[in-house]
Amino acid sequence: MLPDRIFFTGVPGSRWSGIAQTLETIPGFNTSDRTPARTYSHHSYTGHVGAYFGYDMEFEPHVMYSGPEYIDQAWPKPGGTRLVKSHNWSDRFDDIEKSYPTDWIMLVYRPDMASYAWWHEAGGFQIKYPNYTWYRDSAEMLSEIAKQNKHILEYACKNNATWSYFTTEWVETTFGHTVEIAKTFPDILVTVIK
């Protein structure tokens, strides 16, 4: 059974948004956060859809003391599982656990330089949604990618998480539904902390 929320994180350029969109095809996910203003396409991909939480973004990455009504406001329709996306969850894992003990945390890992390169190829600071101005410049972006990945790996280690490739089999085992994964990337790993 899926939780009310999955706090979902990966660094900029980790291709986590494509993984998010694939997961949201599973029955029971609430995608009412999707609007034209919350959509960004690049190349032949719909790069970003739905609400993103982050510094200087539409929704700040508040967890403690904000309550579920703050997080859930991005979804106008009630019910279903909300995939709550933010790069900044990587430094708030303990707060998420305390505030949302029955919800899951999903981590996406891709090495720093591969992520940095893909983020630039996807548009970099020209990306229209979400807003990346908080990262200021390319040097700061690379520094933050490294910090966020470090936190992701530390949290996975602390929880003795098992990393896997994002495959049809992994989705079926983890979420109980079959979703065809068009391509598995050899440098991208995923795990869920329940």
Image (tube, rainbow, N blue to C red):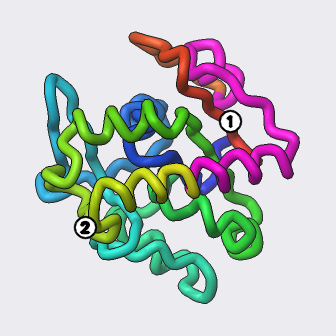
Q: Which residues are magenta?
A: 148-175
SS at circle 2: helix
Q: Is residue 116 left or right of residue 84?
A: left
Reply above or below: 42 against 139: above
Outermost residue, bottom direction?
65
Query: Quick one: label 2, few (<14), some, or many (20+) residues within 10 Å?
Result: some
Query: Quick one: label 1, few (<14), some, or many (20+) residues within 10 Å?
Result: some
What is the quadrant of residue 135 in the picture?
bottom left
Q: Horizontal and vertical percent for residue 107?
A: 61, 43
Q: Horizontal and vertical percent for residue 29?
A: 46, 44
Kind of residue at badge 1:
Thr
Q: What residue is shown at x 25% (from left), y 40% (from top)?
A: 120
Reply above or below: 187 against 88: above
* Residue 139 belongs to magenta span: no
Question: Which is more toward the observer, 49 or 3?
Answer: 49
Q: What residue is shown at x 62% (from left), y 32% (from top)?
A: 190
Kind of residue at badge 2:
Thr
* Residue 150 belongs to magenta span: yes
Q: What residue is shown at x 24% (from left), y 63% (from top)?
A: 131
In the picture of the structure, the residue carrying the numbered disc 2 is 133
Can the viewer see residue 66?
Answer: yes
Reply above or below: 155 against 162: below
Q: Horizontal and vertical percent for residue 45?
A: 21, 28
In the picture of the structure, the residue carrying the numbered disc 1 is 191
